[in-house]
Image: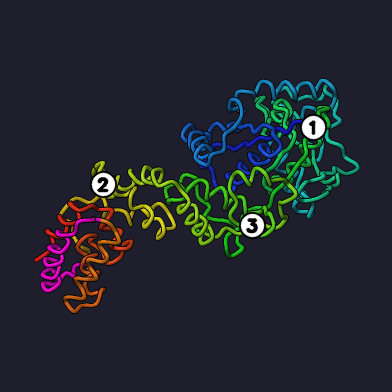
Amino acid sequence: MSVVVRFAPSPTGYLHIGGARTALFNWLFARHHGGKFLLRIEDTDRQRSTEPAIQAILDGIKWLGLDWDGEVTYQFARAGRHAEVANKLLAEGKAYHCYATPEELEAMRAEQKAKGLPMRYDGRWRDRDPGDARPNVKPVVRLKAPQTGDTVVKDHVQGEIKVENAQLDDMVLLRGDGTPTYMLSVVVDDIDMGITHVIRGSDHLTNTFRQVQLYRAIGARIPEFAHIPLIHGADGAKLSKRHGALGVEAYRDLGYLPEALRNYLLRLGWGHGDDEIISTEQAIQWFDLDGCGQSPSRFDFAKLDNLNAHYLREADDARLAALLAPMLEQRLGKAVDVQGLARVQRGMGGLKARAKTLVELADNALFYVKSRPIAPDEKAAKLLTQEARAMLGRLRAAFAAEAAWEEKALEEAVRRFAEAAGLGLGKVAQPLRAALTGSTTSPGIFEVMAVLGRDEALGRLDDQAG
């Protein structure tokens, strides 16, 4: 059997982090088994489903690097097919019209609540004579669900779970206006798309029992299920925005790399021994459902930061420079020139060793693209005393005579200068850093000088030297 899975978000908001993990697990499962990963947009809620939300979901999946197979399926466009299946069940006696009014159903629920009974439809129109139909009421169509025995789900993550059929009522398939319900649409789409495995959050588990009953009524093969635990905050509470329940695009804007977020999401609920850093290639090779745990995972920004720092260090310098360009332009308020961006790329080794996110990387790289004269920040300005500026003037003259503008040669020149002046290396290096970068923190100052190049470095010294 060839594996076919799907990711089926509802475009009523952003692609949240739990949805992104579900998409990743489905994608990895499909790629591991050489199967298909399909994308379905469940846009049946016409009031809340918007084009910007759909585009945000598509962009988020693409940014994560999860390529889907074939065309996107839009659920609303298939409403006619969903209704066709419901009407076939009606014709076969597996579903029926229910003429109960909203007022009747509300009274029924109120009575059940007062008696301490579970609130569910009581089947009052299940076996009624069609001749009792009310001409002034538009009926819904309900599934004639089994009332005895159990519905059993053998879940790849949760194990075997069963529920007594007496606890499940006859769910609505078509509303009074003839539109299909979510439960009907999902099952019909999964059947028609040939879905073999449904991998989704454990919050869908209660739906699964009802959907299994519908599969059986339709006479279709039931897919295999895997309900992965939810994601909680680091404190164990339900995930909220303060924990990291943000849209995927927010993680991009916070400066995380897609490969780092993939690795982090993979480890939220799935494991492979003690491995923490797992490349996408390894994940495809190793991923299967038996590695999923049953306990909720805890979202921890500190762990994500550490993973992202690793992937920053591993990333190609040219790629990082290109990612930083718009961020640097935003900070400068103008376009970054070619020379400045080239400096950023040349200096990437020292920059990315000190950053955990692209945002930090951009902040740290800003001095490479600033135009002269570089305005020192408050701490750097305190270092640039009149005495320090005079010292920098003498140091500038020593640099001008330096034949090789390379990191090692520049360090030797500063050491010779400091020794001749009777100064500690720090007394020279710190004002030098302040003059060249406008800050008291940066990559190694001799690396900075080499990256800036002779003309730019001497020019920045001229701007500050006394």
Q: Secondary structure at mark 1?
A: helix
**Secondary structure mainly formed by the magenta segment:** helix
Observer-nearest of 202 and 441: 441
Badge nearest the viewer, 1 or 2: 2
Residue 104 occupies quadrant: top right
Q: Which residues are magenta?
A: 379-405
* Residue 370: % across, % down: 22, 51
| Element on which disc 3 rests | loop
What number is the disc on residue 275? 3
> Which of the pair 389/414 is nearer the observer?
414
Q: Earlier in the sequence, mark 1 or mark 2?
A: 1
Q: Position of residue 1 (x, y in %)?
A: 78, 31
Task: List the residue tagged with mark 2.
Answer: 340
Q: 154 or 136: nearer the eye?
A: 154
Residue 271, can we see it? Answer: yes
Residue 335: tell me if it is visible: no
| Of callouts 3 and 1, the N-terminal one | 1
In this figure, which residue is indicated by the disc labeled 1? 215
